[in-house]
Amino acid sequence: MRFSWSSFLLLILPLTACSPNVSKTATTAQTNIQPLVTGAIPDRDPEKLQRQYGKLAAYLEKELGIPVEYKPVTDYTAAVTAFKVGELDLVWFGGLTGVQARLQVPGAEAIAQRDIDENFHSVFIANKNSGLKLIQNTAELQQLKGHTFTFGSESSTSGRLMPQYFLQQAGVQLTDFKGEPGFSGDHDKTIKLVEAGSYNAGAVNEKVWQERVKNQEVDLNRVQVIWRTPTYYDYHWLIHPQVQQRYGKDFVQKVQNALFKLNPQIIEQKEILDLLAASKFIPTQNSNYTQIEAIGREIGKIK
């Protein structure tokens, strides 16, 4: 048989098609995918937020098969604005900020919450030298009149919106406090201000309080819980509609599935859930936050 160079070339062409250059091109295409950018309202110490959402971003990147980044923001308003202009795709909002952001982005969806977020509570804490006593029912909130009081962020659901709502239901107005009420900025600062005696009392996210007590970061000889609010819907994940154009129509479901899949039996995933003070994530929807929207409009936080 006579050797044919043309036949030889035909044989090696399929091999060159599978050369390392093609794999490199595929890898490059993968890295060129625009990352999913996650964020969260800064409701506690920034270093703790970086740790918990950094770990979650790494988990989501593995589950979704696309780059995922966590981008910190300076305050609650910045989180809402970043979502509005499309700089953040997936954000952990409180009830109020979630509604504020969603109303500015048609098609935005509340897609998941922790199992504790459908029955959430705030606690009122007081300095033990303030003379304030344990409150047995809403009517006894009247004893706060004439005392100094601090909320958390002005846009916090658990640190301002719902506490102010319950106070008003009990006939306590902001003008009834001694001096102007404070707005500390976050729950950790509220705890420290009341513990130090800078304010007689304050409103705090119950889960943050419990976590700080568990970690022995609160001096219980100086500050105590005097009241626990009734329940309300609070924190949730809000996703921007732009993700469907970028990653496909089924992407929202993929994100939900990844969040619901977090398993406390797997050590790495349990750490993420523990950092987020959750045992699991469950579905939620926009309509769950109608009460929050109504109260937000009532006190002027939603127009």
Image (tube, rainbow, N blue to C red):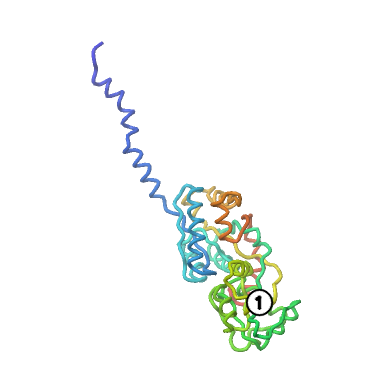
The residue most toward the top is 1
- 195 w.r.t. 91: above or below: below
Q: Quadrant of residue 302?
A: bottom right
| Quadrant that contains the N terminus | top left
| Quadrant that contains the C terminus | bottom right
- 108 w.r.t. 195: above or below: above
Foreground residue among 270 and 39? 270
Foreground residue among 25 and 105? 25
Q: Do we see residue 55 in this rendering?
A: yes
Per the image, label 1 sits on a secondary structure element best described as strand
- 24 w.r.t. 157: above or below: above
Rendering coords of residue 260 (x, y %):
60, 51
Rendering coords of residue 85 (x, y %):
46, 64
Foreground residue among 219 and 84? 219
Disc 1: which residue: 224
Q: Do we see residue 252 in this rendering?
A: no
Going 32% across and 37% down the picture, which residue do you hit?
20
Quick one: label 1, few (<14), some, or many (20+) residues within 10 Å?
A: many
Rendering coords of residue 103 (x, y %):
56, 65
Q: Amino acid at mark 1?
A: Gln
Q: Quadrant of residue 139?
A: bottom right
Going 44% across and 52% down the picture, which residue do you hit?
67
